[in-house]
Amino acid sequence: MKRINATVRGIGHHLPERIVPNEEFEKFLDTTDSWIKSRTGIESRRFAADGETTADLGSKAAINALADAELDPIDIDTIVLATSTPDNTFPATATKVQSAIGMRRGYAFDVQAVCAGFIFALVNANALIRAGEAKRVLVVGAETFSRILDMTDRRTCVLFGDGAGAVVLEANEAGEGRLERGILSTDIHSDGRFRELLYVDGGVSTTQTAGYLRMDGKEIFRHAVKKLNETAQLAIDKARLDAAAVDWIVPHQANYRIISATAKKLGIPEEQVVLTIKGHGNTSAASIPLALSEAKARGQIKVGEVILLMAIGGGLTWGSVVLRW
Ligand code: ACO
């Protein structure tokens, strides 16, 4: 029997218009542009306008990905949308995107794995395609983290931004051996013992409020470097490759120092790491598809190249995907 691979057919992103440079935080917080830049690599981020929602950003990214794929909404079977900042408690933000892009068939649902959300969404979409449940899946990462930031907490509010990215994954018959394209391997984990290292202090069933993001940055940093290295290595092994075969790392953009330490541990030169943190900040589940889309627009990623995606987020959740573009 022929093996089916999930290959990327199109990609797109959308960022809100409002650019928020580090200097804006200096006006109301005991912080500086140079502290933020040197500790995180962030210089500015985008914040959604009043009334602009996660579904609005996700829909625009989805439309851009469809245009890049030269497909119409009718060609899509499924939307898997990763977010921790949904428009409503229910229904799924994915169904709002489904309706906004004019998709009148198939099904749409959300995945919640915080900053690792896009990796978890890709793993779900890949499994649906491999199982024959869908031929084409729109995988979206969309967030409005600005809505859950405590603007009096300098340890967290300077780190995050809003945005969305999307890819169209498509079923294709697998090629021979190492040159097959699409998703080559996946690796995901969670460990709920660490849930209080990064969480939101509100929720429907607890406080009936949306709550604000709380984080133990130092501990997250420690887990991030270790766990990202482990999952990346596992995914590379599962793809039967070695780190030298990786052309690009497209990591979750949380902190330049985490990204740099992880690339070093893997022995992959920094010139092969896609970086967008400078202008995006941490956009949680949107950060990987945003970075992938920008990398493609910059001409960094070419057909046939091997890409390692990796992320860690609240839960804790973490994982990697190796794919051939
Ligand atoms: N401006 C100025 N000073 C600050 C700021 C700020 N924005 N934030 C914290 N500080 C201060 C602290 O209060 C502390 O001061 P103190 O010693 O007087 O108490 C000092 O800077 C050092 O604080 P640390 O937390 O030790 O700083 P650190 O070097 O660890 O950097 C950071 C903090 C950037 C949050 C880092 O720990 C980090 O990046 N952690 C990873 C967390 C992360 O990236 N989370 C994103 C979400 S999770 C994810 O996506 C994986």
Image (cartoon, grey):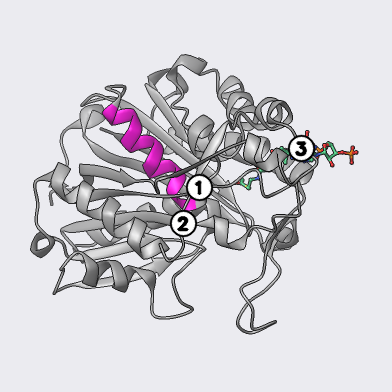
Q: Comparing marks 1 and 3, which lies closer to the viewer? A: 3
| Callout 1 amino acid | Thr
Q: Where is mark 1, residue-wise?
A: 283
* Image quarter where ligand 1 lies: top right
Q: Where is mark 3, residue-wise?
A: 31
- Calculate the distance from the C-alpha at mark 3 to the C-alpha at mark 2: 25 Å
User: Under tag 3, what secondary structure?
Assistant: loop
Q: Where is mark 2, residue-wise?
A: 143
- In this view, the residue in front, 53 or 18, is 18
- Calculate the distance from the C-alpha at mark 1 to the C-alpha at mark 3: 21 Å
**Residue furthest out toward the right:** 30
| Callout 2 amino acid | Glu
Please tell me whether residue 257 is drawn above or below residue 55 in the rendered image.
above
Say how many tags the image has.
3
The residue at 45%/57% (across/down) is 49
| Callout 3 amino acid | Thr
Q: Is mark 3 within 8 Å of ligand 1?
A: yes
The quarter of the picture where the C terminus appears is top left
**Residue range highlighted in magenta:** 285-297
Query: In the picture, residue 229 is in which quadrant?
Result: top right
